[in-house]
Image (spheres, rainbow, N blue to C red):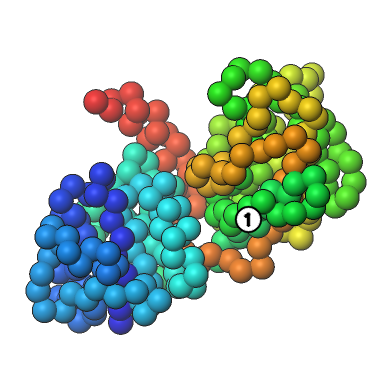
């Protein structure tokens, strides 16, 4: 069995956790694989059994860092079509299932296939210009955020669903999220929590300047279209926290569910709602005591 290892060395100093993972994987009769770009990196452990190869050869991919790291790893390696699992070296870690104090236990479970697979919906997002040309396409595991730019002006967003006009939002923007992303920005904006295996999309406005604050829960097959009234300062699109293409006048954003899910590994250490409760409770304490 071959296990790919990707580590965020701003979280995993000197690749110490990555190297420990590699040692444990070898100890339990499997092969640790690092991306070939790290072959010249002297911080990576050198010993028999460590391989530098493409992750397409792997049975699963381990991400070491926080939720942002795992989203980056998914974005980079989603074409490998293998399951992902995260080791938590971030702040809280909704998506990172493995804590450091259970590392060897978790490696044994991974090598033995002692886990469940969760298939998570992705968003397919296109930015289309006034002539109908696709300017950029994105896949998002968490969410696609459309928000005002560097100026504090509100933006005016027109929402269409399945070719039907729904309403205008005036405010800071709008979040389109998957069930995975329902515990992220959407939750902070007042959206509901969905279980990760569900196949729905959430539409959550950001600080709408209105007496109503309507959210929408849609089928994965629905087509969401975001249009803009004329703006003085261009809004920003951010797919999974990444920088998106510049938005021009008369551009529109079209979002629907992607047919290909992302597979993540559920180690079975806690139930979903137990995780949500403990992680959200811990978040405030973490930032309060962070130095």
| Callout 1 crowding tier (Cα within 10 Å): few <14, some 14–19, many ≥20 | some
Q: Is residue 41 visible?
A: yes
Q: Position of residue 178 (x, y in %)?
A: 62, 51
Q: Is residue 8 rendered to the left or right of residue 189?
A: left
Position of the C terminus, as image quadrant, is top left
The residue lying at 18 percent from left, 74 percent from top is 50
Q: Position of residue 3 (x, y in %)?
A: 31, 73
- Total numbered labels placed on residues in the image: 1
Q: Is residue 278 rendered to the left or right of residue 213?
A: left
Quarter of the view holding residue 134: bottom right
Q: Give whichever of 281, 157 is nearer the camera.
A: 157
Q: Position of residue 143 (x, y in %)?
A: 59, 46
Q: Position of residue 204 (x, y in %)?
A: 68, 37
The residue lying at 90 percent from left, 46 percent from top is 164
Question: In this view, which residue lies farthest toward the left?
Answer: 47
Position of the N terminus, as image quadrant, is bottom left
Task: From this view, report whether residue 50 is shown above or below residue 199.
Answer: below
Quarter of the view holding residue 85: bottom left
The residue lying at 38 percent from left, 50 percent from top is 69
Which residue matches tag 1?
137
Q: Give whichever of 155, 262 is nearer the camera.
A: 155
């Amino acid at each position: 069995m071959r296990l790919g290892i990707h580590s965020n060395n701003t979280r995993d100093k000197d690749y110490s956790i990555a190297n420990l993972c590699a040692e444990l994987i070898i100890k339990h009769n499997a092969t640790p694989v690092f991306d070939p770009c790290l072959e010249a990196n002297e911080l990576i452990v050198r010993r028999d059994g460590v391989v530098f190869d493409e992750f397409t050869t792997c049975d699963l991919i381990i991400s070491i860092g926080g939720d942002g790291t795992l989203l980056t790893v998914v974005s980079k390696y989603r074409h490998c079509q293998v399951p992902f699992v995260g080791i938590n070296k971030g702040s809280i870690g909704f998506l990172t299932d493995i804590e450091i104090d259970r590392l060897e236990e978790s490696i044994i479970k991974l090598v033995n296939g002692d886990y469940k697979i969760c298939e998570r919906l992705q968003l397919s997002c296109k930015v289309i210009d006034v002539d109908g040309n696709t300017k950029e396409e994105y896949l998002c595991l968490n969410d696609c955020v459309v928000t005002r730019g560097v100026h504090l002006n509100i933006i005016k967003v027109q929402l269409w669903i399945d070719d039907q006009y729904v309403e205008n939002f005036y405010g800071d923007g709008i979040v389109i999220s998957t069930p995975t992303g329902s515990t992220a920005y959407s939750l902070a904006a007042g959206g509901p929590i969905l279980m990760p295996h569900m196949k729905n999309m959430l539409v959550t406005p950001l600080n709408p300047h209105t007496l109503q604050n309507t959210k929408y829960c849609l089928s994965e097959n629905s087509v969401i279209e975001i249009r803009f009234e004329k703006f003085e300062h261009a809004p920003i699109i951010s797919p999974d926290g990444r920088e998106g293409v510049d938005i021009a006048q008369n551009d529109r954003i079209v979002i629907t569910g992607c047919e290909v899910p992302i597979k993540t590994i559920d180690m079975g250490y806690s139930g979903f709602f137990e995780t949500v409760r403990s992680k959200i409770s811990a978040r405030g304490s973490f930032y309060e005591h962070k130095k």
